[in-house]
Amino acid sequence: MSSSAHKHDVFQAIADPTRREVLKLLADKELPISEITSHFSMSRTAIAKHLHILSEAELVLGQKVGREKRYRLQPESLKELKEWLSYYEQFWNNKLSILKHMVENENNI
């Protein structure tokens, strides 16, 4: 399979901290690549590569508006991640319940 035919999944896409930061930037509004790049100390080409991976994972959508390309978040694609994480919430909730019980009982001693 050629690298151009390879699609990135949501988990691969969010594995990189730069891409997670790009998603945060796009959470509030649609931005052109020039504005996204201004938030990082890397080249426009590097940011374009990150946006390409996010696009392949269907986390962002790039649309040509005049002479610039603007990107926006596609939060629907985060559903897969949310479903995966929700399974593990039971473990956190259980640990927090135990901690709460321990703290409350410690105060009664």
Image (cartoon, grey):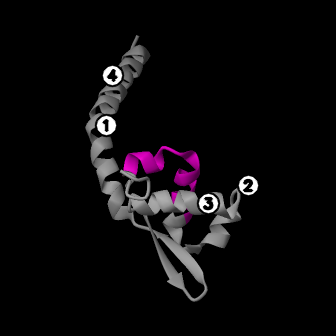
> Residue type at mark 2?
Ser
Q: Main secondary structure of the magenta part?
A: helix
The amino acid type of the residue labelled 4 equals Ile
Residue 24: image location, x then y, percent = 53, 58
Q: Earlier in the sequence, mark 4 or mark 3?
A: 3
Q: Which mark is residue 47?
A: 3
Q: Classify mark 3: residues with Cα within 10 Å, few (<14), some (14-19) or many (20+).
A: many
Percent x, y for residue 55?
44, 63
The alpha-carbon separation of the residues under discs 4 and 2 comes to 44 Å
Q: From which residue to which does the magenta span run?
A: 10-25
Of badges 2 and 1, nearer the viewer stands: 2
Side (left or right) of 13 relative to 88: right
Q: Helix, strand, or loop for circle 1?
A: helix
Which dot, 1 or 4, sits closer to the camera?
1
Q: Earlier in the sequence, mark 4 or mark 2?
A: 2
Q: Which mark is residue 41?
A: 2
Residue designated by label 1: 89
